[in-house]
Amino acid sequence: MVHVPLLDQLALLFAVAVLVSIVAARLKLPSTAGLLVAGALAGPSGLGLASRVEEIHLLAEVGVVLLLFSIGMELSLERLRSIARLLVVGGALQVGLTLLAVAGGAVLLGTSGPTAIALGMAAALSSTAIVLATLKERGELDAPHGRFVVGVLVFQDLLVVPMVLLVPLLGGPVEEIALPIAAAMGKAAAMIVGVVVVSRFLVPRLMQWIEATRSREVFLLAVVALCMGTAWLTALAGLSLALGAFLGGLVIASTEFKHRAMGELLPLRELFTALFFVSLGMLFDVRVLLTDPLTVLGLVLAFTVLKGAIATAAALAMRFPARASWLAGVGLAQFGEFGFVLLSLASREGLIDERLEGAVIAAGVASMFLTPLLIRLAPHLHAGEQLLRPLERLLGAGPMGDGDAQGPARDHIVVAGLGVAGRLLLEGLEELGVGFVALDLVAERVTELRARHPHVYYADVTSEEALHHAHVEHARAVVIAINDPEAVRRALAAVRRANPSVPIWVRTRYAADQPDLVALGATEVVCEEIESASRLLALVLSASGAEDAAVARYQERARDVVRRSLVPAAPST
């Protein structure tokens, strides 16, 4: 019988991952945390079910490539351009301040300068895979804090190559460092320009030819080839695989085939991403925790508390309000996958000894395990953002003040959230001559819309102060169309405290959220799932020859059936 390498160990890893994930789901823990625990249990320092760790790590890299490729498909070049300022300025602030803080602290503790810089660079990087997967699962990629986090993570990935080149040169003269770093940045810029050109001219035509074959297998192969190919090309240029995969996703996102590509790639992505998270958990060595607990605990606090505080400060400096800054800080407060790469390289160069390397790895994996838990918990912890309120006002990131409140003061509509739905609503209100005050937390969007609509403000609808300046107590109605599910709930509570009787119309993505939102005070909830299904029903009935009145009647009946199915049944006596 032919022996397939790794097959037995992969079978055991997946079996342990399934069992631990079931327990995690029962405990209402994020799936990512369960996979990390499964890796720690099955790894060399746990039950020892997997001994060929290096080979499993190499296979798991496919998961990172597929995950970043799919994230790139969801963002697109246009959306990436919209966060360009966050990417450059916010990323530079977060990475620079974290590097300085960690390196400075290491020097004060007696570490040499080159070692301190290496530790600072490794600590400055966050986990792209874990954070983006968690934000995507929660539907927060488009929320204000999600936009900041995505911009910073992309900036960090761009810096991986200069950092990798810098580590072996830390012991040498400064003049030997500048040229390799400049060359690496030039390669990165050339690669991005190349992706933009290819996405505009070559890929759409190529995908049309592949689509003409009417073969699902050929289409999937083409998508995987594009994903792996861009990752491979960026690796040849000295850049990270993750950045190449992300750029490949951006290429597909610019075509009409991105939704089909996502559907075909999804099962493959989920399998390898799960393996990647399990492989990260295998890095955890419980013996290091037992022999040097204080060092590991101190590093965990540095990766979560210190790094989170720095990321929060960077978001505040970018004029994000307290809540978005707090959530962004929590999202970036962990060690990153490429931090392990820098750590290993520094160890080979003799900059970090084996004891310190083991402690950093243990603390890094622990911080990754905490990340999905903290991201889920953070929206419910208001103490952090309350502490930031004075700094928020000092930096001008808080709610609009009296000088901004120049909109209509009575019988107007307050609109929160200026995405596609919010913009359409503003255009309609403007055309009908209905007064409104609009609030949003994306500064670029507010600047753009204020040129056409004077009563658009950079403000947080969850702030009672902002609602007061928008005169919500005298408003005709309030519309909440923001993308942050937890912020929607807080906005409902804030509006109800300010005006208990005003009608509040809320947009939400999932129909299952409707009962909770109504219980919190929503007058009417517009669910994207229900409305899209209703529209599809109307199209099908119209095409089948039904009259308009019958179509409308069936649409409303279908909505009522879904609404009733969401209301919990009364308990039996």
Image (spheres, rainbow, N blue to C red):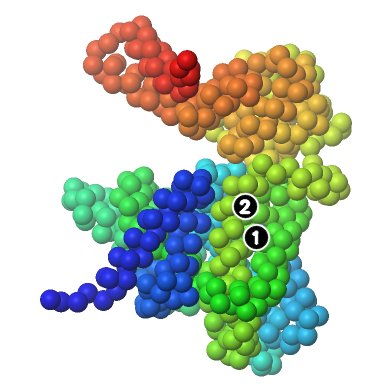
Measuring 66% from the left and 27% from the top, which residue is drawn there? 492
Nearer-N-terminus badge (2/1): 1
* Kind of element beneath mark 2: helix
Q: Tell me if I can see residue 421 in this picture.
A: yes
In this orientation, which residue lies closer to the viewer: 378 or 264?
A: 378
Mark 1, residue position: 333
Distance between the alpha carbons at the discs numbered 2 and 1 = 9 Å
Q: Quadrant of residue 166 in the image? A: bottom right
Depth check, mark 2 against mark 1: the one in front is: 2
Left or right of 488 on screen, residue 265: left
The N terminus - image quarter: bottom left
In this orientation, which residue lies closer to the viewer: 165 or 43?
A: 43
Residue 106 pos. (x, y %): 75, 79
Mark 2, residue position: 374
In this orientation, which residue lies closer to the viewer: 487 or 247?
A: 487
Mark 2–mark 1 CB contact (< 8 Å): yes
Q: Tell me if I can see residue 424 in this picture.
A: no
Q: Amino acid at mark 1?
A: Ala
